[in-house]
Image (tube, grey):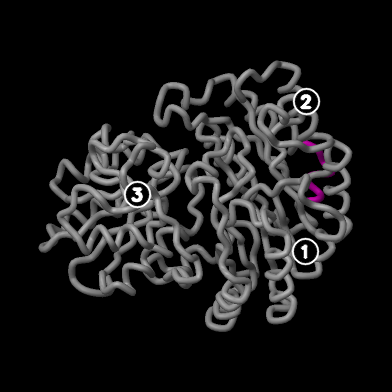
Amino acid sequence: MTGREESVWLLAPAVTFEAPYPLELASLAAALLRRGFGAFGIDLRVEPDGLEKRLSRGLAPGPRAIVVEASIRNVAEAVRLGRSIRSRGWRPVLFTGTAAAIADGFFLAAGAADVEVTGDAEDVVPALLERLPVRKGVPGARFPGDGGHANPAPPRFGDLDAFGSPDRHVFPWRGYATHALRAGHLQAPILGSRGCRLECAFCPVPERYRRAWRARSPDAVVDEMTRLQRDHGIDTFLFEDEQPLQDRAWFSSVLGGVRRHLPRARIELKNGLRGDLLDGELLQEMAASGVRRIALGVESGSNSARERLRRPLDEAHLASVIDLCRLRGVAVTGYYLTGLPDETALETLATLRSMREHRWSYAHLSVFCPWRPLGGLAARPRAIAVAVRTGAYLSTYAKPSRLLDLVRLGDIDLGRPLAAPRRFWAWLLSGSKGGGGW
């Protein structure tokens, strides 16, 4: 625990078998510490009984507040967690994250939350804590009785540079710095921008940020990376941006700063870049700046399905981007969805063919989970989609050429023959949640 005794507890509920670094909560922790509050982090994905252990100690005084980060994929778990906390009398419970921002009162009505944070948590949560007990009128916060989008206190979004860098001690960075299969590198997540204006039909990000896109200054991003490398030996940086290609000039400036100040850095862009925004010139610049892995959001192998999703991507251009990546030594992953609205059998087959036939280093197939209505029956993945996902993985990764490629990339270590099969099995078992990164 750090800061004053009345700490704010920051909770990351489980999503899938993965436990990526809780970067948004770490950024909130930094904001709380700057304002004089304590912060205590519990990652329930790493330590499922961490909260119970904490509560069993009978601490007095209790936390000043408990913050739960809710994503689209852990709505049911977040509701269960929030109800359990409130039933013990620990209040207030503040819900942050994408699901909370778009919830329109869902978590409030479910008895899981006292407040849903719709704006930047770094601004809103300290403002709430400084005014407790507060029931209305904080910009970027939704209270019981507020009418969804008619919320009289609309979201406010601040200057990302003013938030500074995330605190990497409340959630100790070292526990997340190694990869299960890639030895010899220390990794850390980085966030250079927030939001997206592209409005792909399946994605809640534009609504979360009210179709705004904001970026930190390139110097601030590179400075944070430089400190992480200097102070902790980090050499691999995982960009968590929803869409860093939203502003090509900004992205090029970040890449230029990396080339000047971190010539040996490795960069991974794993959040599904838009393939239609990539070309040979930009890919060459990315490779020269240390980009070693990217993911492309393809979503479907069918042109008609991609048009419905507002994800235009020509097959010839996609093949060209993949070839250019491989030519420049950049591993490239394809992200696909199954169980899409109005998806036909032919479209499903087109997706399976695209996964198998393109020269991907990896291909991921997630089960589509509608985010309207939040927590409704429609959000439950259909059994047939889960079965398609499992069959697609078995078919896609059974290709000898792909397995040899993974050995070349170092993601299958012949000295540890069981490591990759175990992770792959966990990946398959997580299918109903749509999850799984290698």
Closer to the eye: label 2 or 1: 1
What is the magenta segment's predominant secondary structure? helix
Coordinates of residue 343 in the picture (x, y in percent) = 66, 20
> On the image, which quarter does residue 34 sit in?
bottom left
Residue 203: % across, % down = 57, 38
Q: Amino acid at mark 3?
A: Val
Residues packed near mark 2 inside 10 Å, few (<14), some (14 to 19) or many (20 plus)? some
Instruction: Reply yes or no: does residue 337 show up in magenta.
Output: no
Of residue 423 and residue 252, the one placed in the foreground of this image is: 252
Return the mark for residue 169.
Answer: none
Residue found 47% across the figure and 27% down from its top: 379
| 76 up-or-down from 227: above or below | above
Q: Residue at x 54, y 20 (%)?
A: 383
Q: Magenta residues?
A: 398-405
Residue situated in front as seen by the camera: 171 or 39: 39
Helix, strand or loop status at disc 3: strand
For marks 1 and 3, give the one nearer the viewer: 3
Give the distance between the C-alpha atoms of the residues marked 2 and 1, in whole angstroms.
30 Å
Determine which residue is flagged by label 3: 117
Instruction: Tell which circle, 1 or 3, labels the residue nearer the N-terminal end.
Output: 3
SS state under label 1: helix
Residues under labels 3 and 2: Cα distance? Answer: 40 Å
Q: Is residue 218 above or below residue 149?
A: below
Residue corresponding to mark 2 = 350
Can residue 164 be spotted in the picture? yes
Q: Amino acid at mark 2?
A: Ala
Amino acid under disc 1: Met
